[in-house]
Each structure stands twice: as structure tokens, then as C-alpha cells.
Amino acid sequence: GRFFLPLFVPLRAYALAKTQRPALDLLHFALEFCGVEADNQIEKWENILSYLSGTERNAVLFLLDGWDEVPQDKREALLADIKKLEYGFSIIITSRPSGYPRALAPTQLYEITDLPPDSIAKLITRWHTVMGQHAQASRLLNHLKDYPDLSQLARNPFLLNLLCAINIQESFANGVVLPRNRTELYSQTLAHIYTYQTNKYPANPFDRQAIS
């Protein structure tokens, strides 16, 4: 069945907050993060959730996001907090493969797979439609057909979103072409970030040499 209450926790934010507030725990932080701020309200919710934790484990679901983003020196303490939580609640932990929390013993493991070709086409079409640039979708679709290596990169949802964003840049009117490989994709993405930062914060532009 469906969970009565899902609670979302960005793990990096929690770990950093705990540095400033050592007594903080995941339940308290989760309530704060979803907008419960008054101490008396937090106490009431903690009592309710403690009661629910003693009934069925499918009453409350904790979504703990971004284990791989937690600083290494804070993971051991976080692991202890998670183990305390798992006795009463169901938990989902997300992580990139490189930061997989091997110290935990999940009962089920799921991996987000690459997008199949039909899903790539759907995402590109819908993305451009939402952005009011439906006519530009065909340009990117045809470009991926011409560059198979780039088409493989597009199976990654994050990289595909980057390609879509680059595809609708106004700079194409000045002769800029779509990237043909990973190097060009990253280079154009960084150029877009530089331009965005400079235009939005002209008094504090990116210093390319400082971060190169």
C-alpha cells in the first residue's frame, strides 16, 4: 500500500546542519525541512511519528537523498543516525554508484538505467515543447543521428538535459554549433555557465583563470 507520510531529507544539508547543532537528528531535521518550524509543533509531530513507528513500518517513508554528496568525514556519524532510524521507519537512500553506501545492508537495490532511444526522443520533444521551442527539437534529434558517440551520451538523463539546454541557446544565431562529443559538451556547458553568471551578476563575474 501507499505510505501515510513521506519525509524528504537532503543528506548533505543535514550533515552540515548537524555540525552546527550536534543534538540534531534526522526526524527533527526532516520536519524542519518540510516547513514545521515551531518547537511545539515539531514536538507534536515527533510524538505522532514515534507512535506510527511502533505500528506498521509502511506508515512513514524517509527519502534520504544524496549519500554520495555527504563529506567523507561526516559519513560515519550519519550512518549511525540512519541505523537508529531504520528500526522504526522504511527508508530509501539515493546515491551515485561512486558513493554507494556499502556499510549499509539494503533489503532491495535499484539502479536507474540509461534511457532507451524512444525515451530520448520523447524527452527531447517534451523538453523543447515546455520551453516553447518545439521546432528546435528536430535539430537535436537529427544531430544525435549524425553523431553516434554523442547519442550514447544522451542516454544519460543529466547529459541529455544539458544538450537540450545548449540546443535552445540564442547564441546559435551567431554560428555556434551543437557539440559532437563529451569534451565539446562540457566545454559549451561551462561557457553557458560563465555567460549566465556574468549577465546575472555583472559585479561578480566568473574568473575563468581562477577556476581553470
Image (cartoon, rainbow, N blue to C red):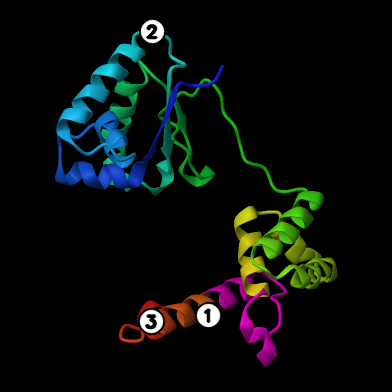
Q: Position of residue 145 (x, y in %)?
A: 84, 66
Q: Find the distance from the CA under tag 2 to the CA under tag 1.
A: 54 Å
Disc 1: CA contacts within 10 A as few (<14), some (14-19) or many (>=20): few
Outermost residue to the bottom? 174
Question: Magenta part of the protein: which range?
Answer: 168-189
The vertical placement of 140 against 161, above or below, is below
Left or right: 21, with 57 as reference point: left
The amino acid pointed to by label 2 is Thr
Amino acid bearing label 1:
Ala
Residue 192 in the image: above or below residue 61: below
Please tell me which residue lies in front, 53 or 23: 53
Q: Residue 88: percent from the left, percent from the top?
A: 35, 15
Residue of label 1? 191
Question: In the rendered image, which quarter is residue 4 located in?
Answer: top left
Marking on residue 55 = 2
Total of numbered circles in the picture?
3
Identify residue for label 3.
206
Q: Decide which of tag 2 and tag 1 comes sooner along the chain.
A: 2
Looking at the rendering, in which quadrant would you find the C terminus? bottom left
| Kind of residue sitting beneath label 3 | Phe
Residue at point 56%, 23% (across, down): 108
Q: Which residue is at a point 43% across and 17% down the rendered structure image? A: 59
Marks 1 & 3, CB-CB < 8 Å contact? no
